[in-house]
Image (cartoon, rainbow, N blue to C red):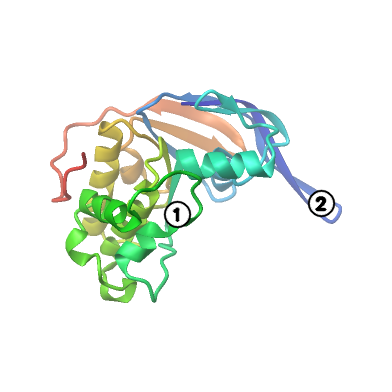
Amino acid sequence: MIEVDGLTRSYRRGALETQVLRGVSFRVQRGEFLAVMGRSGSGKSTLLNILGLLDTPDGGRYVLDGTDFSRSGDDERSAARNRKIGFVFQQFHLLERASAVRNVVLPLLYAEVDSGDPAERAERALAAVGLLHRARHLPGELSGGEQQRVAIARALINDPALILADEATGNLDAQSGGEILDILRRLVDAGRTLVLVTHDKAVAERADRILLLDDGRIVGDEAVQRTAQAPSGAAGLA
């Protein structure tokens, strides 16, 4: 699903140039759950932005689902982002005056596909994360865990093959965070590919592999040996 070879990225501020990624290479198989860990400033967010086609590398190759996006234009990246990628962030980024179902519908406004009945699709996505009964509620009427479920449903609305999550449980209590991880795990089990950035080792250990970054380089890439865990009560995903 993902091929990264020799990826480099630096940023210049005035006369100062900071190299953030230094020859990063790895693969992610379709249907795999990869956690990316590292200290602040290690390059995690920059890497996730490149994987999400929100940024371009200075050097190296990034191939997503068979297409090389290393030097692609804005229009090509935008179209692929809308078709192939769903994003889940630490901040939920919900419109406060829009209901859950209206928040979930938003990506369809930018998708160049026949979306059918947008509200019906949004309700199916909310049902997949166990939140259909809260479809007409505003974000302010939802708990943090429920708001993150809305954000996940929004990420699913275009049926993406790849989900990118940035500290998706960072603003949640332990129980809500566990429920969100159950949902993400079930998405992977249903065949989606997930890359999750986290600083929390316990969260990373729910993945299949942990990629460790330090100063823009990969210093660890290990499979996770985990025991079966009971779900935290999240609804099943088809």
- At a point 43% along the width and 59% down the height, the residue shown is 106
- Figure quadrant of residue 206: top left
- Amino acid type indicated by mark 2: Leu
Count of numbered labels shown in the rendering: 2
Q: On the rendered structure, is 218 left or right of 94?
A: right
Name the outermost residue toward the right.
15
Using the image as rendered, state which of residue 194 and residue 227 is in the foreground.
194
Question: Label 2 near label 1: C-beta < 8 Å?
Answer: no
The x and y percentages for residue 196 are 42, 42
Query: Circle 2 is placed at which residue position?
Result: 16
- At a point 68% along the width and 35% down the height, the residue shown is 72
**In this view of the protein, can residue 38 be seen by the observer?**
no
Q: Is residue 68 above or below residue 75?
A: above
The x and y percentages for residue 17 are 79, 47
Q: Nearer the viewer, mark 1 or mark 2?
A: 1
Q: CA distance from mark 1 to mark 2?
A: 37 Å
The x and y percentages for residue 16 are 82, 51
- At a point 41% along the width and 24% down the height, the residue shown is 29
- Figure quadrant of residue 78: top right
Task: Tell me the SS state at disc 2.
Answer: strand
Q: On the rendered structure, is 158 left or right of 61?
A: left
Q: Is residue 157 above or below residue 218?
A: below
Q: On the rendered structure, is 181 left or right of 73?
A: left
- Figure quadrant of residue 73: top right
Q: Is residue 127 above or below residue 20?
A: below
